[in-house]
Image: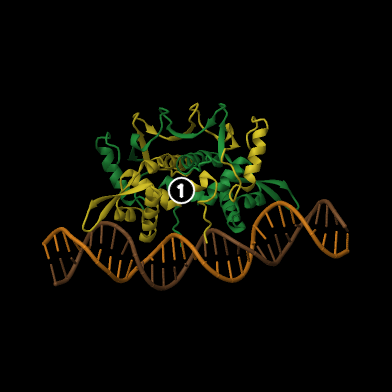
Chain colours: A green, B yellow, C brown, D orange
Amino acid sequence: MRTDLSGVHCSIARSMQVLHDAWGALILRDVFVGLTRFDQLQQDLGLSRKVLAARLDSFVVEGILEKRAYAEHPPRYDYVPTAKGAELFGVIAALMAWGDRWKADKAGPPARIRHDCGALATARVTCDQCGEPLLLETVATEAGPGGRLGPGTRMLGKLLSQRSKQARKTTPM
Amino acid sequence: MRTDLSGVHCSIARSMQVLHDAWGALILRDVFVGLTRFDQLQQDLGLSRKVLAARLDSFVVEGILEKRAYAEHPPRYDYVPTAKGAELFGVIAALMAWGDRWKADKAGPPARIRHDCGALATARVTCDQCGEPLLLETVATEAGPGGRLGPGTRMLGKLLSQRSKQARKTTPM
DNA sequence: CGCCTCGGTTGCTTTAGGGAACGCACGATG
DNA sequence: CATCGTGCGTTCCCTAAAGCAACCGAGGCG
């Protein structure tokens, strides 16, 4: 059985649990771009209808997507992102930026993001306080208020609480 | 057989292929924080040794992590991030930010990021050109130079090239 | 020598994904 | 009216991958 990570006390685990796998990310990408119907998605992605149905259901249950009826008799739905789902766009954009940078074809990226500022945008993950890029070399991880131990964070909790007592100049790594 | 997405012409698919699943993200998180040995990781995450070995191997092959010997006879390694791997920190941070916002416990987030600017940082995905947040409502997706069709982007390509001919004011959605 | 630790590997069982066919409610077509 | 086509799933069978636990080999320690 696949380990259930939903109870794990880690936001990363929980986010990934929602996204589920590569298909989940690709479905969201398509929905963000405007492919919102079952068959459109199935044909575009080429994944099995079974998995598509399962992912869409789980997205609806999670509150990431919403079914919007565009016909009754028979009931037919568009799947559109909720506010919660729309905020996953940042994650998708970050994935896309990394892939463009490190896994691109010679031909260049297959798609581009045009920002309202007029420029072709590349996603950059920044610190919300100072606006500077959030790089591994410029951060230190500390234990947070909800930092109890448990599967998924067994020794990490100890390590982090030790570390936050030390001088914080030395970045982890 | 699991569909091989490595040939899919989409940076998101390729990035997710590298991350693989929730375990992949959690392993990277631990490595970024300083848990770099096999048994440390296995005990912290509680995942099966088999899967851990497989993920670490794939990360090394992908050039995300590097084995650094800390003992010979018997050979023992730390797994440390390469430059390519370190840049995935942005993706992890974005996942963490979303999880903190939408899936947090009442207790608060289990861990926090201290940025070099001194503040506790929340990751924000921004446009690298203007610095403003990159939100779904403020972007439009266009076909890129390498945008040929194929599994994973069958009708998306058509949709995007149509759309870039239209007025770009209407966001997708 | 016996025992512990680290870093895996192997075998067995369970589960989830792929592929393809089926179902079903409707509308359009011949 | 019979049949076709479309939209949206659901079901069946098969294989690949995850979980669990045991095992293994090189070395250190008492």
Q: Where is A90 relative to B69, above or below?
A: above
Q: Give residue B172's position: percent from left, percent from top.
A: 63, 37
Whether residue A75 sits left or right of residue B63 in the image: it is right
Q: Is residue B142 visible?
A: yes
State the residue in front, A165 or C17.
Answer: C17
Residue under the image location 37 percent in, 51 percent down: B60
x, y percent for residue B165: 67, 33
Query: Amino acid under label 1?
Result: Arg
Q: Tell me the residue at 36%/30% (across/down).
A: B119
Circle 1 Cα neighbour tier, 10 Å, few/some/many (<14 / 14–19 / ≥20): many
Say left or right for A86 vs B20.
Answer: right
Q: Residue at x 67, y 38 (%)?
A: B162
Residue D29: percent from left, percent from top: 13, 59
Quadrant that contains the C terminus of chain B: top right
Res A79 visible: no
- Please give the chain letter of the residue carrying mark 1: A
Q: Residue at x 43, y 49 (%)?
A: A13
Secondary structure of residue under mark 1 = helix
Q: Is residue B34 above or below residue D21?
A: above
Picture mark count:
1
User: Residue B19 or A110: which is nearer the viewer?
Assistant: A110
Q: Which residue is mark 1?
A: A14
Q: Position of residue B37 (x, y in %)?
A: 29, 52
In the picture, measured across the screen, residue A28 lies left or right of residue A167, that is: right
